[in-house]
Image (cartoon, rainbow, N blue to C red):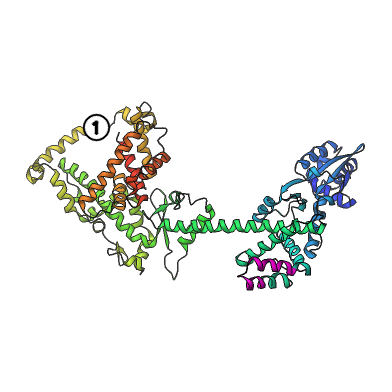
Amino acid sequence: MATSSNLSSIIRYYAEKQKSPFIDFREFCAYVKKYAEHHVEEQVDLVKYLGDPTNTVTAELAGLEQKHLAAVIPNGNKKLIVAITYFSMQFALQYKEIGKNEAVPYPTERELPKKFPIYAIERKQAEQYIIQCLGSQNLKSPLLNILVFARELPPLLLPACVPIQLLLETSQKKIIRVCRKDEYHDYFLKKLRGSNPTKEITIKNFFSHFIDQEHSGFLNVTEGDDYYLWNQLCYYMRQDFEKIQDRTSEDTNVLQAIQISEIHSTYLKQQFQTNKKREEAIKELKVQLGKSPFFFSNNQILKFHDQSGRLLYGQYSEEDLRNTLQQMSTNGNNNELPELVVFKVASGTKYYVYKRKAIPLVIRLCNEAHDSIEAAMVKKWYDAMLNYEKLPEMTDSRKFEKCLEEQIEVNSPVLYAMLNANFMTALSLEKSDDISTVGFQPFIDGHLRPYSELLLLTSEQVMSKVKMDLPFIYTMPVISWIIALFKSSKKKKSSSKDVAEPVQLQQEEENPIKATKHLSREEALAYQAQELKNDFIPEGSTLDRELNYLNKQWNKMITKEANMALTEDVNSLIRDYTRRVCKTLTAQSFTKERVQNLAEALVKTPNMQKIGEQAALTEYVQLYILRLISNI
């Protein structure tokens, strides 16, 4: 034995040396002292056993008893140390013999000496222990376990260092050994044929392959007809052997082997069901990634639900999700991009989008961004011209393009990130059926189109809308130029007066929680609704933009009048419903889950059930409720 300061290892070594698991306490203390004196230079921790080690050994034995590695029992006026690890090693050798000769019975409690403290060994349910070890097993553990079987079978002694696969193999060999006996072979073959009259050839092949021929390895009965017939064979054998009144040790051994095999079959069935659910969940994940809004962050993916409303995350593990996303976003065929492409926005959030959806998504985002960017530029130009100012982008096309780029970055960061992503240029060159169906291409010959073409927005359009809103006098060049001269001189005088903001307003902006501390119930509720918008609106989008998009998803009316009428009817239902609910709502109870529950309850009403696209309708109701409450 290598030098060790571990008391459990020393006890086992001493037991092997004297060939007995029962060790006199005083003799062992004397041995430990000599052992420490001899090896203290190699193991500094042995210094604690120098001098009189009685108290130290007693304290450590108490810890070993709690870990089921040793026990202390009285022996007249003396104390004996029971080396449980010694028994563990002995029974491990016995299992090796069973692996070579299936006629050797499994060790049971009867094989332990009478003075052995049976309470010192941990008792475990056979089903729980075997299934746990099939998942992961520590083969270096020195523990000795008692496996308790169902149906009043004698418990089994099983060292933790014995591979659970060895236990399964020996159980199969014991069952097959019985089936090969003349008195049982034809009997069980006839039973299987009787219960499966349409599977005569399958049963014959099963017996021929597994029973009649010598087979030294583990039998593959994990799936298909073999799994079914093996379980049926175990069931018939258990029925017959349980009827035996005066069982021999061999009969008991066969019943133990059958129960071990049945536990393994149960595990295989559970694994099959779990894997099937996991595969279905991953398949549904891929379907969800292809649905609107087509781009998803990690947090959004974690909230995907299946058709039954259950979270997909949990049906597959975090590792499964990570591996699936990594595989889909890295494995491409024939030097092409992978099916899932990734991009990051300025805030660092990472989004996934199918490459077949990337260009249609860019076009959709451009259409959605058109109105908000046009409105922002009209307001900016309007304010400038109202003050008789001229902005460079009003007349310079290059600066107009630069201004559009800045507006896209602010108003639609997802669109901006996609337009500047490395994969977009390569994607525009790929000849794909999904991509070729899109008429408008944001990239031509590997170059991005001008932003004015992407947004279908020109400086003339913006100026035209600005002039429509301005008073007539502002459109007269000569008069506006004269007034601008006077305005510029006045600005210089008043600029120094408007440098600082009010101190109270600045403090409220820096500390919004303090500013809302004394709000009324309605004001606090509105403030909470404003805060919740971030949980429902994708980064870079707006409430109006999302409502407009979702409205197009669930409202399929063709004529303009019918479309507007349906939208107004739904909005009216939401307003009436929200008005009633608001009477009992508080800011504390108004959470994200509460908004979702309210929307789902309204969508399930008979009038709402007549509308298709329930998922888009539910999201629309959520956002509309937030809009109503935030405007209280």
Could you tell me which quadrant the N terminus lies in? bottom right
Question: Does 157 appear in magenta?
Answer: no
Which segment is the magenta one?
185-205
Q: Name the element at disc 1.
A: helix
Say if 432 sits above or below 278 in the image. Answer: below
Q: Where 340 sits versus 155, above or below? A: below
Q: In which quadrant is the C terminus drawn?
A: top left
- Is residue 204 on the magenta stretch? yes
**Res 480 quadrant in image:** top left
- Of residues 340 and 1, the one nearer the viewer is 340
> Is the residue marked by circle 1 packed among few (<14), some (14-19), or many (20+) residues within 10 Å?
few
**Horizontal side of residue 548 vs 589, given as left or right:** left
Residue ID for mark 1:
498
Identified by mark 1, the residue type is Asp
Residue 240 at x, y percent in the picture: 74, 59
Would you say residue 143 is visible in this rendering?
no
Up-down relation of residue 591 to residue 316 (above or below)? above
Residue lying furthest top: 518
